[in-house]
Amino acid sequence: MAASSRAEVLRLYRALLRESQRFGGYNYRTYAIRRIRDAFRENKNIKDSEKIEELVNKAKVNLEVIHRQVCLFLSFHLRVVRSSNSSRTTKS
Amino acid sequence: KIPLAVMWQEWLAADSHTNSHECPKRPTTLHHRFANSTHQLSHFLGIPEAGKRAEQCSCCHADCKAHHETHLYSVKAAGLRLPIWAHGHRHLEKKAQNPTQIYCFVYHASITKLGWRAGPRVSEPLVNVVLEALQAFRLVSFGDGGGALRPLYMDVQATTPLDPRVLDSMLPYLMAYYGNPHSRTHAYGWESEAAVEKARRQVADLIGADSREIIFTSGATESNNMAIKGVARFYKSRKKHIITTQTEHKCVLDSCRSLETEGFRVTYLPVKKNGLIDLKELESAFQPDTSLVSVMTVNNEIGVKQPIRDIGEICREHKVFFHTDAAQAIGKIPMDVNDMKIDIMSISGHKIYGPKGVGALYVRRRPRVRLEPLQSGGGQERGLRSGTVPTPLAVGLGAACEVAQQEMEYDHKRISQLAERLVTKIMSEVPDVVMNGDREHRYPGCVNLSFAYVEGESLLMALKDVALSSGSACTSASLEPSYVLRAIGTDEDLAHSSIRFGIGRFTTEEEVDYTVRKCVQHVKRLREMSPLWEMVQDGIDLKSIKWTQH
């Protein structure tokens, strides 16, 4: 049980990160990636299986939310450009 | 004119993960595909050879020049070893008249259709040199071809972007569940009502209230009006005095002014130099017929946090209602209406990453606060605010409050770090910068800095690729310096040169660094041009100068 949970959690983590990278808006993308990373890092030592289950469900819900929002952005051709010299920029 | 270098670096680092290929490297390395909407751009590149060809291209189709430029982009991209999407050129095939066109077509086609990476191998430093040169010669004018660059957003006190989670919760109610929440006879009404009640509970949980004490309004301005005018008018037979501060939001001050015309007396408490009110002055301002005290929790211009708990205590002792405009504070610092003894509180949706056009008013039930309703109608919202509750907006506000409650600690820590970084960097690189407002009792995400010997408007215009403001959005159209800064006693010249930096949930470290860099650069540049700065450098005390009268 613990082993499959670990694989599941890792799978979710990668899926979340991959989905967030598709975000069209610079701010949303960077926030999503940062938040996901920090949230998983924060909770990595939790042993209580109920809590883990709850967090995994929350992650699944958030994955769907991100997916929908990413698709919305794409379907409206919204890509937010930042006129900064920094390398992380996208186009609107 | 936005520098070409910027534009090119856009392209060099265009993030194309929209094509969803898995990338082990960072998204900004130079190996990504360009999306097809290169064609949207219509910028004319002043590169001599390109110009020639573009002109020679007789317009065989609309936007020939533009079309050609996009080819050039593709070429450049190819030169940098970037694969390019093929895009349809069949129309050119038929219409190509002169050899140049065919050349363009062939060149381009060879790159795109055959996937062949042609063109000279241009190294990135060389490209940068070319770009810098172009920038120096100002060969680029940036037309808005629908692909205009947008500035960094550093004005979160004016409004905030919608959190994607909030938008996600709102959409079903905008698309499918469109019923009126006050319709009692069918499922559309019931489901909408359920959603509104759930939102009400979410808002109440954030502030430690009961859901029956929340009333949805159209925003914090309406909530403030309802609170002040409503309470004052209800108790006007016996109580005719209101206390507020000089640094309140315009809607509060304006409501008080309109009440003055109705015969009420209003005391506008002054604030100390650090923006906080003096509690002793507040105590002495109480009169036997005071009905309401209104003090905002976090100021939207200078970010100071008033001692709400202490003010609440004082008001309880004197049995006076305490209203606070918590629009900027909600969801960012922990607020509890029972702990802080708040009787009425205004909440704004679009300051906490929720939708615009919705807000809430918390009205305490025990002990009951009575309001005279501003808006008459069908008696919705406990009779205090008639009118259909906008279900999607209310749901958005509820979701925003819930998200804010979960993210409050994380956001606060991050925003404090970023604000610290911003202030320390600016203050270490540029002298004579004053932070308006108290250093400790503040919300860190609102930083108001005054740059001496620099005109605020010119600095704002110079920082055109960062969205900033000086003063609040509602007073940004007027030329006067902000009344808040005047109330805290800043000199006229410092008040004119103040800029408000807003850091929010979605602000990144890179944005902060870029803002700092640009700000420092422009402040230095503007100071170089300023005769006052020269005089100061020479050691002349500006206050001692007698300016001649003409």
Image: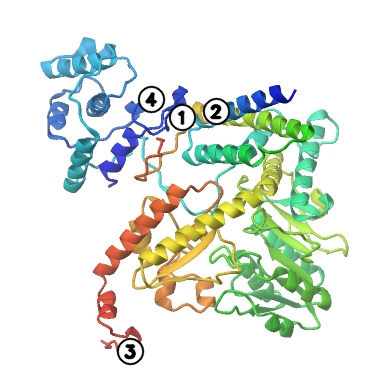
Q: Residues within 10 Å of mark 1 (few under 14, many from 20)?
A: few
Residue that numbered label 1 is attached to: A77
Marker disc for residue B35: 4
Evaluate if marks 4 and 3 touch, with contact meaning CB atoms under 8 Å apart.
Answer: no
CA gap, disc 2 and disc 4: 18 Å
Q: Amino acid at mark 3?
A: Ser
Q: Determine the residue positioned at 34% across, 37% down.
A: B10
CA gap, disc 3 and disc 1: 59 Å
Q: Residues within 10 Å of mark 2 (few under 14, many from 20)?
A: many
Q: Determine the residue positioned at 65% across, 23% down.
A: A7
CA gap, disc 4 and disc 3: 62 Å
What secondary structure is found at the residue carrying circle 3? helix
The image position of residue A83, as x and y in percent, is: 37, 44
The image position of residue B216, as x and y in percent, is: 73, 50
What secondary structure is found at the residue carrying circle 2? helix
Q: Quadrant of the C terminus of chain B?
A: bottom left
Marker disc for residue B544: 3
Q: Nearer the viewer, mark 1 or mark 2?
A: 2
The image position of residue B101, as x and y in percent, is: 16, 18
In the rendered image, residues at marks 4 and 1 fall on the same chain: no
